[in-house]
Image (cartoon, helix red, strand yellow):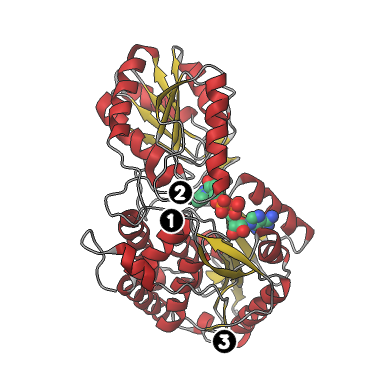
Amino acid sequence: MTETGSAADWKSMAGQVSPDARPLMHGKRADADVGTFDLVSPRDGSLLCAVPACGEAEVNQAVAHARAEQRIGCWPRFAPRRRGEILAGWADAIEAERSELALLISLETGKPIKDAVEIDLRGVVRAIRWYGALADKLHGDHPDVGGNDVALVSREPVGVAGILLPWNFPLALIGYDVAPALMLGNSVVVKPSEQAPLSVLRCCELAVAAGVSRDALSVVPGLGHGAGQAIARHTGIDSVAVTGSAATGRAVIRASGESNGKRVWPELGGKSAAVVFEDADIAGAAAAVAWGAYFNQGEMCTGCSRLLVQREVYAEFLDALSAETDKLRVGDPLDWATSVGALTTGQQLRHAQLATEEAVAGGARVLRGGEPVAVVAGGHYFAPTLLADVPESSQVFTEEVFAPIAAARPFDDVDDALRVAFSSGYGMGISVWTSSMDTAFRVTRAAKAGIAWVNCFEGDDLTVPAGGVGRSGFGRTKGTAVLDKYSDVKTTWVRLAS
Ligand code: NAD
């Protein structure tokens, strides 16, 4: 497959994809003697394939390979430059196969193919290249401790890293977690989400083909309480990054405490707010908020699904946001023109409906959407929804619904707006819109959030860390902040003969 843009016939290309959900172990796809579960496409409810429900036995096998690689294998012993070159080759291989990978993502998650190509695939390739290029630029320290002593401070791989992935951006964390973990010389055991194993398995297969040692990277598909818990509890795993819901993060922390006390890096959900002041660029804020609330069908940890708007501009802002919402096109994920595809699971569709009904029963007004849309028979489609005057206690305002729903409330008092903005306990991001520097800093300083945006939403770069606080966890991706997840600092102290 070579076509990657609007000219491609994605529907007929989807027919040529052959899903393979077998685990990747010891460099090969291996049949696992386990039960299976069905992987169904949210696009149309069709069966994509049966996925092996791997568990403790397969995780044990992957960890045994991973530990052997650390003990006697070449991956941690390669010069960092060589690991970096291999990662660069992996990025090239992903780029060459971006159509197939994008199709797998779109089929398993329901996201628009255009986003899968232009955002997911571009993002993972960039991240792997970025961390590959960093490999030979890291160095330790040699502080002058005086006298006859020499001190060396070096960074060493933690050993075996477990990485539990979510489904909303299946490959993003291959770039932000797997690539830096490998770059530093670790062995990695990945568990993809049960809803999105295919793209992850194929992507990691390309890593081994590009030269990553076969025992340095395994992928074990399965369920959260099966393979997920087996990784969280494994005493041969030194570090676990978990990107998922707040409840999952707590379960993994608990499992670590009950096993070997491995470090856990939780990157969890969010319920980020946009706070729009009367002196803001209303049109700019509406366009950014529409993206923040509806991009990726609202299935985004940083999504700004709660809107607090100063009463003086409340009506004007909601009119502008309604106009932006009207520009979106809900459609078949395999149509290049689609901007909002299918929700990944039927459970989310039901949750979106129920949460909307609850808000309306509490007095909310439906300005746009509010109900499922028929797009492709058997699929899960929900209209981009704008709700005004939502009760502060309603689920659309307090919980991560993970659907294209924006819930708005007016505010009069800034302190009250700030209290409400963080009342959910989530602390992923906040987006503040104002032309006053004083107001902007007043809000960002008060923000209990990992990311504060001023007059923008999702300002983002590989050089800056991303992650949350509070119920959103404390793990970080991107930049050099991620190095602490996958390396230990060692001090070596030498006393010279006097
Ligand atoms: P999820 O919590 O259901 O699952 C995440 C991963 O953990 C999956 O691989 C799952 O199988 C595994 N898992 C589930 N229960 C487990 C358990 N008890 N023990 C061990 N592993 C377990 O999340 P999801 O529905 O796949 O993804 C959506 C969630 O992820 C949302 O809450 C979203 O906000 C969050 N997310 C956060 C970030 C971030 O960077 N903070 C990024 C993307 C997604």
Disc 1 target residue = 478
Give the quarter of the figure containing the N terminus. bottom left
| Image quadrant assignment for residue 202 | bottom left
Q: How crowded is mark 3: few (under 14 residues within 10 Å), some or many (20 or more)?
A: some
Disc 2 target residue = 466
Give the CA separation, mark 3 to mark 2: 33 Å
Judging depth in this view, the residue of 78 and 221 nearest the camera is 221
Residue visible at 69% across and 75% down in the picture = 34
Residue visible at 72% across and 68% down in the picture = 234
Q: Is there CB contact under 8 Å for labels 1 and 2? A: yes
Q: Is residue 224 above or below residue 473?
A: below
Residue visible at 44% across and 74% down in the picture = 18
| Image quadrant assignment for residue 264 | bottom right
Q: Is there CB contact under 8 Å for labels 3 and 2? A: no
Q: Picture coordinates of residue 291 (x, y %)?
A: 34, 39
Q: In this view, does 404 lie above or below 151?
A: above
Q: How crowded is mark 2: few (under 14 residues within 10 Å), some or many (20 or more)?
A: many
Give the CA separation, mark 1 to mark 2: 6 Å
Disc 3 target residue = 73
Q: Report the side of 149 relative to 284 (left or right).
A: right
Sooner in the amino-acid sequence: mark 1 or mark 3? 3
